[in-house]
Image: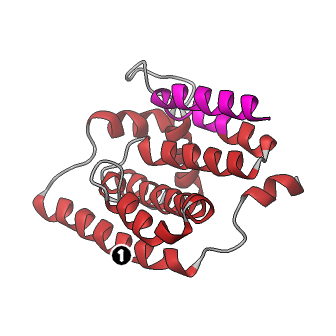
């Protein structure tokens, strides 16, 4: 278990605080804007994930969806004692996943290109397709990014057991990441 803990950063570097705080401001602005305009995120994929989180043993939504994000929503609902509305809860989970992915991206950048860490964090964190905007209208993608970046971090640190656990979790989150996890696994096997 001690080796698994080595893969998790012991503290968040100060450089990452600015993008996370700015991301929180943007996220709050988007969430408030959605509410002000009357836009409901309870549609399409998110509706399916929220409905599925009430009955994890049944799935009637898109056959390509995986249960990982629904299970995280269920866990968050339990931890919040069912007080927070499901859509807001999903947005909070999306933001926390975005922030965790930002931390993982920062660790990777610090290891492979430390001079570009802050710029890279801003580019990753605010890019329209994967940035904080995807946390305000959440689907499984931000959680999948956490798993993918966590797996890369563990691979760079040569921590094989945490890599296996994160990969297993990632396989339960998003099918589009299956080729990535296969390629990462093959690279890790061939590099040893």
Residue found at the very far right of the displayed protein: 2
Count of numbered circles on the image: 1
Question: Circle 1: is it few (<14), some (14-19), or many (20+) Cα within 10 Å?
Answer: some
| Residue occupying image coordinates x 79% and y 41% | 160
Q: Secondary structure at mark 1?
A: helix
User: Where does the image place residue 16, in percent across and percent down from the top left?
Assistant: 50, 74
What stretch of residues is rendered in magenta? Answer: 167-192
Asked if one can make out residue 85 in the rendered structure from this viewpoint, the answer is no
Is 177 inside the magenta-drawn segment?
yes
| Residue occupying image coordinates x 54% and y 54% | 76
Is 48 inside the magenta-drawn segment?
no
Q: Which residue is mark 1?
A: 22
Q: How is the image coloured?
A: secondary structure
Q: Is residue 114 left or right of residue 186?
A: left
Picture quarter containing residue 64? top left
Residue found at the very far left of the displayed protein: 37
User: Where does the image place residue 91, in percent across and percent down from the top left?
Assistant: 38, 56
User: Where does the image place residue 112, in percent across and percent down from the top left?
Assistant: 59, 58
Residue 67 to residue 25: above or below: above
């Amino acid at each position: 278990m001690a080796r698994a803990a080595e893969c998790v950063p012991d503290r968040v570097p100060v450089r990452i605080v600015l993008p996370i705080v700015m991301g929180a401001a943007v996220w709050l602005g988007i969430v408030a804007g959605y509410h002000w305009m009357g836009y409901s995120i309870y549609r399409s994929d998110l509706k399916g994930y929220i409905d599925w989180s009430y009955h994890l043993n049944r799935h009637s939504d898109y056959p390509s969806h995986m249960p990982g994000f629904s299970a995280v929503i269920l866990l968050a609902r339990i931890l919040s004692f069912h007080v927070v509305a499901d859509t807001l809860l999903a947005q909070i989970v999306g933001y926390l996943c975005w922030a965790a992915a930002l931390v993982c991206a920062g660790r990777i950048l610090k290891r492979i290109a430390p001079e570009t860490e802050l710029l890279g964090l801003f580019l990753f964190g605010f890019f329209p397709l994967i940035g904080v905007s995807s946390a305000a209208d959440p689907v499984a993608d931000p959680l999948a990014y956490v798993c993918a970046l966590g797996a890369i971090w563990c691979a760079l640190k040569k921590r094989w057991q945490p890599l296996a656990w994160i990969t297993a979790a990632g396989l339960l989150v998003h099918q589009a990441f299956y080729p990535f996890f296969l390629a990462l696994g093959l690279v890790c096997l061939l590099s040893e």
